[in-house]
Amino acid sequence: MLEIIIQIVGEFLLQAILEVLGELGLRAVAEPFSKPPNPYVAAWGYAIFGLLAGGLSLLLLPHHLVEAGWRWANLLVTPLAAGLLMSLLGTWRARRSQSLLRIDRFAYGFLFALALALVRFRFAQ
């Protein structure tokens, strides 16, 4: 049981670290643009960015971090946790009067992490 918890935590940390690094990169890129994009276009952008991050993660960690029996549960739980983490990060930034990106909201953070998890679920060995 402890091994399963460690595997799920490892998968969560992978997604959370990639998502936070992605958010930092998006902050640097978003600065020149003053008009926010359409929410649907932004959602597609975060999904594509998550797919790309998932592909890059396979270069670093080509094997599944979670046992076969737990992968389906991990496919839902880990993106939910990552979305919650991004929502908490957004709340923390808002309290400090920092600018917020869409990924600082639960839905966009979840979408990014779900796309990343789907790539890892399908293509990891």
Image (tube, rainbow, N blue to C red):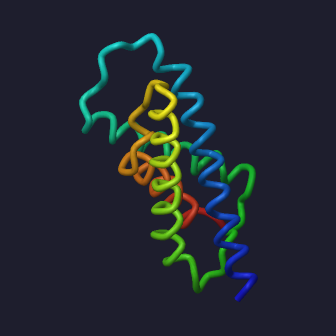
Q: Position of residue 91 (x, y in %)?
A: 46, 42
Left-right relation of 86 to 69 = left
Is 113 placed above or below 68 here? above
Quadrant into which the N terminus falls: bottom right
The residue under the point 54% across, 35% down is 23
Q: Residue at x 47, y 34 (%)?
A: 95
Q: Indicate whether 61 appears above or below 71.
A: above
Labels in figure, total: 0
Q: Is residue 102 above or below residue 108?
A: above
**Closer to the camera, 80 or 97?**
97
Q: Position of residue 13 (x, y in %)?
A: 67, 57
Give 109 or 85, whichever is nearer the viewer. 85
Q: Quadrant of the C terminus?
A: bottom right
Q: Is residue 13 above or below residue 22?
A: below
The picture quadrant where one finds residue 37 is top left
* Residue found at the far front of this picture: 95
Q: Residue at x 51, y 20 (%)?
A: 29
Q: Give residue 106's position: percent from left, percent from top.
A: 40, 50
